[in-house]
Every structure is written in C-alpha cells, then in structure tokens.
C-alpha cells in the first residue's frame, strides 16, 4: 500500500486535514498515465479546501456548491484566478466537513490527490477501505445478492487490495477490471454498506498470512486451478466442484457464440497475430475441470497456438465467456474431445461406409451426451460453453446459490479457497 508514499503524510497535512490519511486508506487511481488530464473540476455541497500537499499550506477554500476548475500551470496548478500555484506539484483537495466530493459529475468519498510529477494531472482518490468497498460491491457483484454472498465478496475485494501490492505505481488500485471496478457513491446501496460493515474487521488468511483472493461470475460446474490460468500453482486456489450456481439465473452458465473465420482472424490480428482468415480450430488439450488449455488456430497466413486463459481472452472475452467450451464448424470435424484429451480420427459407420464424426450426441450408459469434434474446419465456427470468467477462486453466482441455501460467508469462502481461515 502506498499510504505513506508522500512526505506530507507525516505531520503537517494530518494536522490541517484530519480526514486525510488513515491506516486503512486505499489510494484509487482515477486518471493516470495515458488517461491523465489537463484539467479537472471539483465541487462539494459544503465547500472544499485546497492544500499544497507537500507543505500543508492552504491555497484556497471554495464556497458551498462552488465548482473549482483546476488546470495546469507551469509545473503545478492554477484555478480561474482562485489560486495560482505553478510550483506546487502535489495538491490535496479536502471536503470541508468530510461530505462526498463531486468530480466530473460523480461523487466520491474520501479526498482527492493531484500529482503533476508525470506531466499531466494524475487524479487519485484516497478513501477508507470500507468506503471503497461500499462501491466495489455494487459494481463487482450486485446489491440485490444475498447478504452472506455480499459479505464473502467484501472479504474477497479487501484481500485483493491488501494482497496485490505493486500493481500500479503511486497508488494501490485502478477503477477497472484490471483491479476492481469502482465508481464512487453511485454504486453504493444499503445492502453493500451493511455487508461491508458486518465484516469490517475480517480478512482471509492462508498459513496465517493475508493473501489475495480472486473471483469471477460463473464457473459452469467446476472452478479452475490457478496454474492452469496464470501458470503457477497456488495452494488455496485449486479446482473445486461447484454445484451451487442457479443454472437458470447465473450469468452465462450456458452460452453459444458463432463467429466467422474472418472475424476470428481480425480479432487475432488486433492482438498482433496475423494469420489471416481462420479456417481450422483444433482443441489440443483440456484441464481436469474441462476447460480448454491449448488450442491451435490455422489460417491462410499461418497458425497460432493459444494456451491458458489466452484461449479465451485473445479472441475476446466478450465472445468466449469462459474456457469450458467445444467448437464446431460448417465444414468437417475430426475426432472427439474426452476428459482425457482428444480422441483422434473418430469415425462413424454409415450405410455407405465410414465418415468423420462431426459433432452431435452419443448414447452411453449415462444417457445421451453432447460431443463435438476437437478439430473443426470451415468458414463459420460455433462455440458452445459453460461459465463466465477466468474460473479461479470464488464464483459469484455460486456464492449467491450457497447463501440462498443457508450457508454463511465463512462457509462460502472456505468452499472456494482451499485451506484458508477467516479472522
């Protein structure tokens, strides 16, 4: 955590602006890097104090409801004649009575910290951990989920922040799915506030240490082990059975996506893999959970083999919602995929001889089961799958189902994270 990264945090600013800097503050990057801004507008119903964040000197106090536009000037800032501070690189903006601050039409708790060190204005929102989580729960889960599921999500989100130091330079987390989605006050609800406050003093630990926890929308029946997504094993992030998801309500529990070979080729090219129009897709390996682990795509200009979560994300998570899928095409399909891997050269006996298996259903002792060719060629490809997300950690819809069945948040977390404690 970067709570002590700036000198002003030691004494001066803490005395002037006691709302700033507590031990549990999360520094949230709103605008930074390529998204850094040349100006920013702030307002509060009770007024704002603008401080030199290095010295603690008060630069300006705005009136109730007054909008203050802060722009670049020299190496620092200026604001419409209200204050002129061309040598002040770091600026702190505090609400007069700790009420939310409106930044570009959205309200945020905590305070604001502006930094010109990188050129344009980096906008950071330091906010208490609980207040940060009020918003994250409303965006990363949903305020209508059962209370125990929301509590489990709160601990997942808190552990992610505490366990994932170093994802960004100068602040703790961003506001996107790279970290956790955060939009300030607008995402809060009574249910998210209550859930966060109910577990405010709780964290999850493995072997006594706070560890980052991960989550996703829907597993499709089994979660995934970390080594099959990120390439390294984590003892508490192992595959578990997930029978709790309500299949009729869970987001993308079952899904089907159809794409042309030209569209797939264009998507690969956008990621730097120029193999032309895709004409054949071969699933070469699956994980024990049934997710695609190795897949080769062939096109007019070459081939590309994808592994791990790239089997989903390179083509696009907006099309391939998870990796638990089979693929068919409008041309020939060869072989069938089994839990042990591909069965090459599968054929069926017909009235005129033998023909390649092209996908469909098969009768077994367990009943009729769907199968699909592990190698499909043609111009149009159909992916049929289960689950939404990377599959590692807690299924949010599984947490929903467990809570509906009477499990509490500790039960939920211990089910999805092998060997953890909650304390």
Image (cartoon, grey):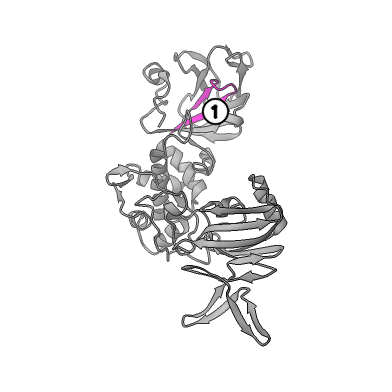
Please determine whether, in this image, residue 263 is positioned above or below residue 15.
below
Side of 57 where 332 appears, left or right: right
Q: Residue 332 location in percent, x, y?
A: 67, 70
Q: Residue lying farthest left?
A: 208
Please tell me in which quadrant of the rendered image residue 44 appears. top right
Residue at 53% from the left image edge and 22% from the top image edge: 115
Residue at 44% from the left image edge and 38% from the top image edge: 131
Residue 14 forms part of the magenta stretch: no
Task: Name the dominant secondary structure of the magenta segment.
Answer: strand
Q: Nearer the viewer, residue 132 or 67?
A: 132
**Range of residues picked out in magenta:** 112-127
Please tell me in which quadrant of the rendered image residue 336 appears. bottom right
Residue at 60% from the left image edge and 13% from the top image edge: 74
Image quadrant occupied by the N terminus: top left
Side of 92 where 163 appears, left or right: left
Q: Residue 393 location in percent, x, y?
A: 42, 53
Please determine whether, in this image, residue 310 is positioned above or below residue 15.
below
Q: Determine which residue is flagged by label 1.
A: 123
Q: Nearer the viewer, residue 336 or 131?
A: 336
Q: Residue 322 location in percent, x, y?
A: 54, 57
SS at badge 1: strand
Residue at 60% from the left image edge and 78% from the top image edge: 347
Side of 100 where 422 appears, left or right: left
Residue 393: in sight, yes or no? no
Q: Residue 37 location in percent, x, y?
A: 61, 27
């Amino acid at each position: 955590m970067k709570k002590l990264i700036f000198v002003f945090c030691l004494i001066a600013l803490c005395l002037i602006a006691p709302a700033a800097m507590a031990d549990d503050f999360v520094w949230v990057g709103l605008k930074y890097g390529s998204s850094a801004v040349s100006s920013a507008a702030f307002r509060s119903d009770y007024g704002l104090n603008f401080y030199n964040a290095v010295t603690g000197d008060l630069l300006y106090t705005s009136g109730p409801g007054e909008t203050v536009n802060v722009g670049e000037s020299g190496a620092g800032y200026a604001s419409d004649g209200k204050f002129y501070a061309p040598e002040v690189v770091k600026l702190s903006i505090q609400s007069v009575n700790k009420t939310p601050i409106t930044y570009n039409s959205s309200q945020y708790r905590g305070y604001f910290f502006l930094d010109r060190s990188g050129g344009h204005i980096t906008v950071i929102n330091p906010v208490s951990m609980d207040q940060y989580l009020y918003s994250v729960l409303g965006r990363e889960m949903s305020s209508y989920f059962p209370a125990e599921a929301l509590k489990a999500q709160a601990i997942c989100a808190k552990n992610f922040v505490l366990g994932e130091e170093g994802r960004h330079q100068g602040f703790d987390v961003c506001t996107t799915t790279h970290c956790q989605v955060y939009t300030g006050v607008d995402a809060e609800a009574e249910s998210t506030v209550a859930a966060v406050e109910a577990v405010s003093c709780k964290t999850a630990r493995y072997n006594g240490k706070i560890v980052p926890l991960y989550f996703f929308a829907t597993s499709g029946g089994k979660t995934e082990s970390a080594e099959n997504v990120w390439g390294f094993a984590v003892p508490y992030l192992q595959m578990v059975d997930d029978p709790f998801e309500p299949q009729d309500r869970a987001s993308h529990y079952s899904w089907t996506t159809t794409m042309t070979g030209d569209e797939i080729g264009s998507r690969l090219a956008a990621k730097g893999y120029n193999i032309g129009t895709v004409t054949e897709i071969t699933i070469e390996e699956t994980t024990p959970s049934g997710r695609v682990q190795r897949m080769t795509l062939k096109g007019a200009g070459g081939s590309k083999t994808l592994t791990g979560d790239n089997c989903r994300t390179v083509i696009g998570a907006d099309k391939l919602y998870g990796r638990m899928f089979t693929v068919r095409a409008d041309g020939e399909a060869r072989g069938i995929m089994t839990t042990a891997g591909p069965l090459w050269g599968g054929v069926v006996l017909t009235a005129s001889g033998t023909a390649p298996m092209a996908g469909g259903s098969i009768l077994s002792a367990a009943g009729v089961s769907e199968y699909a060719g592990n190698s499909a060629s043609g111009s149009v490809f159909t992916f049929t799958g289960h689950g939404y997300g990377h599959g590692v950690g807690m299924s949010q819809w599984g947490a929903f189902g467990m809570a509906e069945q009477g499990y509490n948040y500790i039960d939920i977390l211990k089910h999805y994270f092998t060997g953890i404690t909650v304390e």
